[in-house]
Amino acid sequence: MRYRGNLNAATTFIVASDFDCKRCVDFEKTLRRIYDKYKERVKFGFINFADEPTLASLSCEAASRYGKFWEFHDAIFEHEALVDSSFIFNIATNLGLDLEAYNKSCCLLQIMIR
């Protein structure tokens, strides 16, 4: 589970969502408006609720090792389409991640889930 917003807030709003679900992608726009309005008063949580690990979810987990989970999360949901490896590596490049180390993190996560 990943959190953002006011991490000390008495109120927590948790979203179980899937990066590859069209309804989840559509609903993310609403969630973003809620977050923008209440981020100072609410602790927002996210948990990936896909049937199985996907490129998007593994990429976000790898990015979390570099403190970039939410940047990846937001970029993937803003994309509004299934992601591919070139899209993921473009995000990593734009965020200034060490691509070799990031790629190793993604590969390790894939091995761990098997």
Image (cartoon, rainbow, N blue to C red):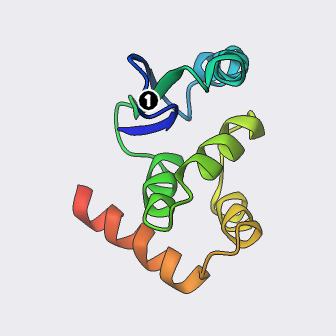
Location of residue 3 in the rendering, given as x and y in whole percent from the top left corner: 44, 37
The kind of secondary structure element at disc 1 is strand
Location of residue 59 in the rendering, given as x and y in whole percent from the top left corner: 51, 57
Vertical relation: 53 (above or below) 111: above
The three-letter amino acid code for the residue at tag 1 is Gly
Structural crowding at the residue carrying mark 1, measured as other residues with C-alpha within 10 Å and reported as few (<14), some (14–19) or many (≥20): some
Image quadrant occupied by the N terminus: top left
Q: Residue at x 46, y 58 (%)?
A: 64
Image quadrant occupied by the C terminus: bottom left
Judged left or right of residue 63, residue 26 is right
In depth, the one of 18 and 52 nearer the eye is 18
- Residue 21 picture quarter: top right
* Number of numbered discs on residues: 1
Report whether residue 114 is seen: no
- Residue 80 picture quarter: top right
Vertical relation: 36 (above or below) 60: above
Location of residue 13 in the rendering, given as x and y in whole percent from the top left corner: 45, 17
Which residue bears the numbered disc 1? 45
In depth, the one of 12 and 53 nearer the eye is 12
Q: Residue at x 45, y 31 (%)?
A: 46
Judged left or right of residue 100, residue 28 is right
Q: Residue at x 77, y 67 (%)?
A: 94
Q: Residue at x 72, y 58 (%)?
A: 87
Location of residue 69 in the rendering, given as x and y in whole percent from the top left corner: 53, 52
Report whether residue 63 is seen: yes
